[in-house]
Image (tube, helix red, strand yellow):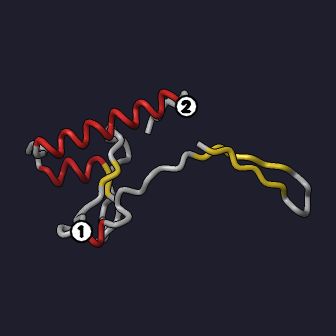
């Protein structure tokens, strides 16, 4: 978490903004043996959460994901489940330490 401040050179007005910097997990995705085929931004909501005509590589939303899996469960290997659980735990610990509630 960083607080970035700057001063406008003409008006002299100071401004600041708090930023959270996170790792981009998809940064090297194009180099993987099995590249990422689809990306979904899941929020746990269905209100305005559908991209009507998603183009190749465009981030899709919750209702696109539900349509994609067609009611089937999403199977993960035991190792993938462990990695995902650790990531969620670490994110939760970090957000707790910085007193942030992420509603996204």
- From the image, tell me which residue sits under label 2: 98
Residue placed at 31% from the left, 69% from the top?
57
Residue placed at 29% from the left, 58% from the top?
39
Does the rendering let one see residue 71? Answer: no
Looking at the image, which is closer to me, 36 or 63?
36
Split into 4 quadrants, where in the image is the N terminus?
top right
Q: Position of residue 4 (x, y in %)?
A: 70, 49
- From the image, tell me which residue sits under label 1: 32
Q: Quadrant of residue 73?
A: top left
Q: Position of residue 3 (x, y in %)?
A: 68, 44
Q: Position of residue 74 (x, y in %)?
A: 13, 45
- Which element type, helix, strand or loop, lies under badge 2? loop
Give residue 83's mark: none
Query: Height in image: 48 above or below 99?
Result: below
Q: In whole angstroms, how far apart are the C-alphas of marks 1 and 2? A: 33 Å
Split into 4 quadrants, where in the image is the C terminus?
top left
Query: Height in image: 65 above or below 29?
Result: above
User: Does label 1 or label 2 sit earlier along the sequence?
Assistant: 1
- Which element type, helix, strand or loop, lies under badge 1? loop
């Amino acid at each position: 978490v960083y607080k970035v401040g700057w001063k406008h050179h003409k008006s002299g007005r100071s401004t600041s903004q708090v930023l959270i910097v996170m790792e981009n997990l998809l940064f090297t995705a194009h180099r993987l043996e099995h590249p990422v085929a689809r990306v979904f931004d899941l929020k746990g909501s269905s209100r305005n959460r559908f991209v009507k005509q998603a183009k190749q590589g465009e981030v899709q939303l919750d209702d696109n994901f539900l349509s994609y899996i067609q009611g089937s469960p999403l199977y993960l290997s035991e190792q993938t489940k462990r990695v995902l659980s650790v990531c969620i735990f670490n994110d939760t610990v970090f957000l707790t330490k910085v007193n942030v509630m992420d509603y996204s």
